[in-house]
Image: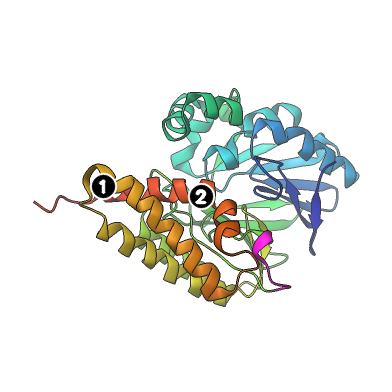
Amino acid sequence: MTDIIDYAHGISAIDAQFQRPRLNAIHLIVEGNRAAIVDTASNHSVPLVLDALHGKGLGPENLDYIILTHIHLDHAGGAGLLMTHCPNAKLTVHPRGARHIADPTKLMEGTIAVYGQALAKRLYGEIVPVPKDRIIETRHGAGISLNGRELRFLETSGHARHCVCIHDSRSEHIFAGDTFGLSYRELDCGERQFVFPTTSPVQFDPDALQLSIEALLDLQPSAIYVTHYGQVRDVARLGSDLKRLIEAHVQLARRERNAGSSRHERLREGVARLVVEEANRSCWRLRGDDALKVFAGDIELNAQGLGAWLDSLPSLA
């Protein structure tokens, strides 16, 4: 059964059922009898999107846009397959990502480099290319109209150089992909939510990410939608926490810069400590080993991202 959270303003979060429940949200925007999807997760999630549309009284022909916040495959892996089912849909993507959506060969190669071939194939299968004439490149300030509802794009690099966030004119909310971090619902204490940065490989840039978060906070949205997972509120507090935790990741990386062959393991251990410390500091509902289980995959990816960032820095010699 498709797991859907319905918010106000015609916005819903569809559970992509990717790896575990409520890890990966696909956001659906409905305006009248037209719809848009923000991020798609993997090929395995395509039937869930079609089922969610049906539950709203819509069919695949009512989907006007598939909007990608960036082209990491847990966000974009199912885009090409979903496009084959939705004859009227256009796909929006940052210009740096457009060629990889049209020809996903290098995108899959990069994913295999992170996950290994067997796991990458199991998670994502065969990535379907999107015809170039169905792709809209979304530079900073570009906009599209969903049945009269304006969606405007903001370039928000830092997590990757091909990231965009989307400002929704109707709700005044923002769809942020991974730019506003991870906020898993298992951690919530009542209505109090929490956030943790994602520094996954290979283009993490902490200075750019801090600027991107500042740009989102300047818009003063009452809610932001993150892929991992769903709607978050109390945005100013979460933004402050996120900026502090990004800096903590940077300091960890700098301490371990010259750790040699043990660097990756030391980075992993350091990120795990940051998870435990933040769980205690902010009073997450899950702490200790329970928190570490939720973040197990993210700890590995954050360590890889920090390592890639260190490798991009000028030599100290």
Q: Which residue is depicted at the point 46% across and 70% down?
A: 214
Return the residue found at the far front. 289
Image vertical order of residue 37 relative to residue 316, above or below: above
Q: Alpha-carbon neighbours of circle 1 within 10 Å: few (<14), some, or many (≥20)?
A: few
Residue 120 seen anywhere in this rendered image of the structure = yes
Q: Earlier in the sequence, mark 2 or mark 1?
A: 2
Compared with 114, 34 (above or below) is below
Residue 30, x across and y down, in percent: 79, 52
**Residue position marked by numbered label 2 in the rendering:** 298
Q: Looking at the rendering, which quadrant does residue 249 occupy?
A: bottom left
Q: Residue at x 69, y 42 (%)?
A: 65
Figure quadrant of the N terminus:
top right
**Number of residues whose C-alpha sits closer than 10 Å to that of mark 2, classed few (under 14), some (14–19) or many (20 or more):** many
190 magenta-colored:
yes
Q: Residue at x 79, y 62 (%)?
A: 7
Mark 1, secondary structure of its residue: helix
Q: Is residue 218 visible?
A: no
3D distance between C-alphas at marks 2 and 1: 21 Å
Q: Which residues are magenta?
A: 186-191
In the foreground, 75 or 219: 75
Name the residue nearer the viewer: 254 or 2.
Answer: 254
Q: Identify the main secondary structure in magenta.
A: loop
Q: Secondary structure at mark 2?
A: helix
Instruction: Give x and y (percent) for residue 293.
Output: 58, 52
Disc number for residue 312: 1
From the viewer's perspective, tell me whether residue 63 is left or right of residue 25: right
